[in-house]
Image (cartoon, rainbow, N blue to C red):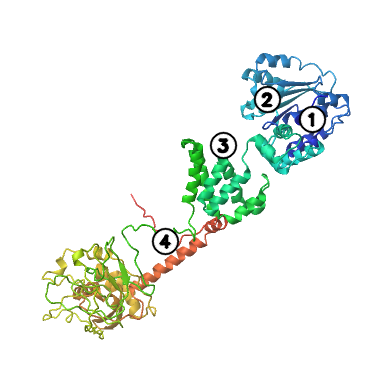
Amino acid sequence: MSYQVLARKWRPRSFREMVGQTHVLKALINALDSQRLHHAYLFTGTRGVGKTTIARIIAKCLNCETGISSTPCGTCSVCREIDEGRFVDLIEVDAASRTKVEDTRELLDNVQYSPSRGRFKVYLIDEVHMLSTSSFNALLKTLEEPPPHVKFLLATTDPQKLPVTVLSRCLQFSLKNMPPERVVEHLSHVLGAENIPFEDDALWLLGRAADGSMRDAMSLTDQAIAFGEGKVLAADVRSMLGTLDHGQVYGVLHALIEGDARGVIEAVRQLAEQGPDWSGVLAEMLNVLHRVAIAQALPDAVDNGQGDRDRVLALAQALPAEDVQFYYQMGLIGRRDLPLAPDPRSGFEMVLLRMLAFRPAGEGDAPKVALKPLGISQAKVDPQVTPVADAAPVASSPVVGAAPAVAPAPVVALQPVPQPVVAPAVASPAPAAPVVAPAVIPPWEDSPSEQKVAAPVSEASAPPATVVIEPEPKAEQLLKVAEPEPEVALPVPELADVPVIDSSDLNPPDSDDEPPPGDYDYVAMDADNLDYDFADALADEPEAEPEPAALPATGLAADWLELFPKLGLGGMTGSIAANCTLFAVDGDSWLLHLDPAHSALFNATQQRRLNDSLNAYHGRELQLSIELIKPEQETPAQAAARKRANRQRDAEASIQNDPLIQQMISQFAASVRAGSIEPVDIVEPTRTTS
C-alpha cells in the first residue's frame, strides 16, 4: 500500500476529532441535533484551518444512513464513500478552475434533479471568491431558493471579494488560526501514535513555522521526519527551515544588557556564519522584546508559544522597562531603514551599536574617560553658602595668583569670605594694576544704590561674596603669588533705630547726601510733569510676595483696606500705600505705618502724592505722616496675597476633586503637573442693547 501523508491520514472524520474551532462546531452541532438546517453555509479562514474538512463532515451528517445527527456512524457505505471522496451526491467544485459563467450554468442544470443515493445533494464550492461576476449573478437565485434536497457549502480564504448579495444568503462561519500551543499539542498526539521520536523544541519550531495552519504543520512534520531519518529533532528542523537559533538572539540581547560592544560584534559574526535574513533576525529580537515587555507588565500573561517562557521571565527581571521600550523602538526603526544600508549585515550592526550608544543612562553609566573641556569650567559652590540674590554686578579685576602655562578658559568661582576683607593701599587715584575688593551688599538693604558702594565688613558679619574674574588675562597682567600683608579692616556701620520720617526731614535743604534710590524728583523739575512711567518700571522688576500679617485687620486697619482701592493709586505710590496700614487718626492728622522692607521706594514725592489722593477723596486737607514700622495688622498687599493664595488653593482642590481627573489618574496613571494650575477669573458677558 502506498504511503499516505499525515495531513490526509489524520484528517478529522467527525466533529469530535476536530482540533479547535469550538465556536463553529458548537453552532453546527446544535443545528444538526435540532434539525434546524440552513440551505447555504459559508466557511471562511486561512488555509489549512478546516474549512473543507467541516464541509465534508456536514455532508456525512446529512446523508448518514443512521439519520441526520451531529455524530455520523462512519461505518455505513455513505460515510465510507464520502471519506474516500467517491460519493456521487457530494459535488465538489474548484471555483478557481471553473470561473466562467458557462461552468456555473452547467453546474446548476442538475440542481433540479433529486439525489441518487443520499437525502441531500450537497454542492461544495471551494475558493468561491474566484468566481466571476457573471457566475455570481447566475448563482444568486438558486442560492437563495434552492430545491429542498439541495445544500450549498461554500469555502473561501478571501471573503472580502464576495458580493454582499452572496453573503446575505449564507450562514457565515469564520474559522480562526491555530495557535502554536494547539499545533504542538496535536503534533505530539500524532507522532506518539505513529511511534516517531521527537523533541519538544522541534515541535515548537514546526508550530511557529505553520503560521496558524494545521495542514501546513502536518506537511512540515512529514518533511522533518524524512529529513531526520525517522526522527523529529530540533537541530534538524532548524536546519531544514533555515530559521535562526533562538539562543543566538538571546546572546545578542545579553550583550546589549551588559553594554559589551565586543560581545555584540562577536554575536553578529556567529550569526553571519549561518547566512541569515538580517531583517528576520531583527524581527526575532522584536518578538522577544515584546514578550519581555508583557512579562514586566503581567508575568502570568506570558505564553510558552516559543518554548522559552523561563528565559523571557529572566530577561524581564534583568532588563529595565525603559530599556525594553527603547530597544524595541530602535529595532523597529532599524528594520525600516535596513534596506537603505550598504549591505544588510552592516545595517544590522549599526542598529545594535546605536542601541549601545543611546541606551538610557543609569547610575553607573558615567563616562570613565574625562571629557575634553569646552571652555567653561564648572562653578564650585559651597553647600553652606547662599548667594545674595540682589547683589549688583561688580567690576572685576585680574587674577592674583599663580597662572598655568596655558589658560584655556575663564574660571568662575562662588566662595564665601573666610577672613576679613581688607582694603588694599592705593598709591594714586589711577593705579596701573588696580585690585578692586568685591562688593558686599549688607543684608538690611534690599537693593544696591547706584551711588553707594558697601564698605568691606568683618568676618563675623560678612555674607557670601561673588567674585567675577575676567576671562583670558594677559601674561604681563598675571602677578606672582605673595603672602597677604595684614591690614586694618574698615569698621562696619551699625544700624540705628529708624526715626519717624516726616516730609520736612526727608530732603533737608542743607544736606549734601544723594537722595534715596527711586526718587526721581531730586532734579530741578516738576515731578508732576516728569515724563516717566513708574508702573512700567516696576513691572519690569519681579515683585516678592508679601509675608502674611501677624493679626487680621480690625478697626482703622480694616478701614484702610476698604479705602485703598478707592484711591485709584498706581505705580510706586500705589505699591507704598498697599504696604501701609492706618495706625492712628487724630482729626485731620493721619499716621500710617510702612513696612521697612519697602522703604527703598519711599520718598517725599510719594508721600505728597499719597496725601494729595487722600485730600481729593475726602475733600479736605489732611496732614499725613508715615513711620517705617512693620505693620502688625494686615495691609492691602497682604490681603491681596491672601486672597490669591486662597483662590489658588481652591483651584487646586477643584482640579484634584474633579471626577474626570481622578478617573484619568486611576486608569491611566496620570499626574497633575505641579505649578500648572492657575485660577481663572470668570467674567460675566456684557449685554448690549440696541
Amino acid bearing label 1: Lys
Pick the front one: 566 or 180: 180
Q: Residue at x 54, y 54 (%)?
A: 258
Element under disc 1: helix
Viewer-nearest of labels 1 and 2? 1
Tag 1 residue: 9
* CB-based contact (under 8 Å), mark 4 and mark 3: no
Amino acid bearing label 4: Glu
Q: Earlier in the sequence, mark 1 or mark 2?
A: 1
* CB-based contact (under 8 Å), mark 4 and mark 2: no
Image location of residue 428, percent across then percent down: 11, 75
Q: Specify whether 374 is left or right of 84.
A: left
Q: Residue at x 21, y 64 (%)?
A: 475
Instruction: Please tell me how crowded label 2 is: few (under 14), some (14-19), or many (20+) other residues with Cα within 10 Å.
Output: some
Tag 4 residue: 678
Q: Earlier in the sequence, mark 4 or mark 3?
A: 3
Q: Give me the C-alpha separation between circle 4 and circle 3.
A: 56 Å
Q: Give me the C-alpha separation between circle 4 and circle 2.
A: 65 Å
Pick the front one: 431 or 261: 261
Tag 3 residue: 277
Q: Give me the C-alpha separation between circle 3 and circle 2.
A: 33 Å
Tag 2 residue: 127
Pick the front one: 599 or 176: 176
